[in-house]
Image (cartoon, rainbow, N blue to C red):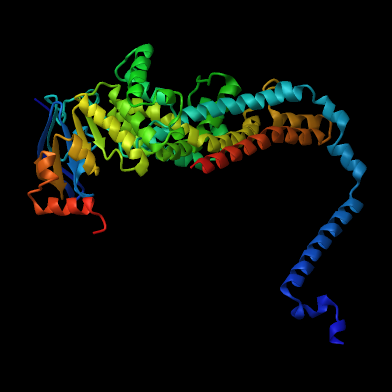
Amino acid sequence: MSTVEIRNLHKSFGKLEVLKGIDFSVETGQVVCVIGPSGSGKSTLLRCVNLLEQPTSGQVFVDGIELTHPDVDIDAARRRLGMVFQQFNLFAHLTVLRNVTIAQERVLKRPRAEAVRIARENLEKVGLSEKAESYPAQLSGGQQQRVAIARALAMNPSLMLFDEPTSALDPELVGDVLQVMRRLAEDGMTMLVVTHEMGFAREVADRVVFMDQGVIVEDGPPAQVIAAPQHNRTREFLHRVLHPGD
Amino acid sequence: MADQQTPASSGRRLTLRQRQRASRGMQYAVLIAVAVLLAALADWSAIQQSFLNLDVAKEGLPELFTVALRNTVIYTVSGFVLGFAFGLVLALMRLSRVAPYRWLSAIYIEIFRGLPILVVFLMIISVPLAFPGFELPGGVYGQAALGLGMVSAAYMAENFRAGIQAVPKGQMEAARSLGMPHGRAMVSIVIPQAIRIVVPPLTNQLVALLKDSSLVLILGVTATQVELAKFGNDQSSTFANPTPLLVTGLTYLLITIPLGYAARRMEARQGASR
């Protein structure tokens, strides 16, 4: 069964066509990594899945519900989707604990005590129980990103979207975040990850999708797309990423 | 002969530093001359009699604080609260996706930032002429709050708008992607952060409002409704002595200077944390 299904998705910003007809799906429990050069449309694709960007045309289904249908309650639909941003986007005026409880209480209407319990469980999962009373500005980038993951998980999403989750981090902080994501994948979470971390993609992904210039160029298991790419564009991109400075 | 000339008469041969020193010396000389002149010409006992007359100053107590300052604070705070609430609404209208809201808000802001408060007060007084039988609740207090609130709302709306726009876009996106509707995200996530950003400019608004509250006297206030400026003015006519005006001025400064200082401190701290 597909958790996400995308049919003939197009997205233009003014005259610039960023997505030129994307067809693609993520099976339940799969981890799919989207790779590609900057400007290839991979982040836009991700943002179209939870409608942070309104697609110009095409359909997006999550759990069989068409999010692009005009009558759909977009706020209700987004509860199924956890989103992790490149810039973390923790709520700066709230403590770590409150960051994780606020949407549970306001959106899912969970009682305070239950929300706090679930928040603490998820903070423990990302290894930050002791930071519950801190404010985001007091945390490192890697810690902030792990809180952002806990915040998304607390909503019990059926799919997690990651938009270059480690690109804004200092190199020594990347590992902790990837470790959390790896464990999430092992637990069977369905994940769609836009990333430049080839090691993570090779090791964790069930499928790797290579995008360039608004289309999917190649889609298959990492052993194929990363280790033995069929297309020239994929090969060139991987060479640039894996051997920078050559 | 040439080297016996005084420095002043051989300006062209002076070094830059010597010229600066000479100029500074001249400025001190002028200052001292003026001070000496004033001290010699002024009638100090008369000045003390009129501006620093302690007997007259004592006559104003305790009403200066229990009535006048109290009323000034009431007018200021009620105007501020009204302006804060209405200003926030105007700012949200200004940022609305519905174009007519944006226009209405923009027109309101332009009008009320451009009108003197005195004119607004005069119009408020005239409202019963246009609507016979209509009376604003709260009498002078209601009129003062309305006038001060309407004008300060226009200024605060611009502060709020800037504050809301200064909150990073990712905050709204994160809230929306957690399933919060736009309005909920605005109330729980964006506005609390925007208010922190606008505390310093709003403190300056409070200072401005405190000073503008002196214009409430145009509304025709009774002895119990009197605020600082009118109180000082009335006292000084009663005793034919301007000391109460000086006392009134000092009472204003007692509030405005610490508030202004606090606003600058907060501005500096925000600037440093960016």
Q: Is residue B69 above or below residue B112?
A: above
Q: Is residue B12 left or right of residue B271?
A: right
Q: Quadrant of the N terminus of chain B?
A: bottom right
Q: Position of residue B5 (x, y in %)?
A: 86, 81
Front-most of residues B156 and A133: A133
- Residue at 15% x, 49% y is A212
**Residue B188, image quadrant:** top left
Q: Position of residue A137 (x, y in %)?
A: 45, 34
- Residue at 25% x, 55% y is A244
Q: Is residue B206 left or right of residue A31?
A: right
- Residue at the limit of the structure toward the bottom, as seen here: B1
**Residue B32, image quadrant:** bottom right
- Residue at 68% x, 27% y is B227
Q: Is residue A168 above or below residue B140?
A: below
Q: Is residue B158 left or right of residue B236?
A: left
Quick check: can you spot residue A236? yes
Quick check: can you spot residue A6? no
Q: Is residue B175 above or below residue B35?
A: above
Q: Position of residue B185 (x, y in %)?
A: 35, 28
Q: Position of residue A188 (x, y in %)?
A: 19, 24
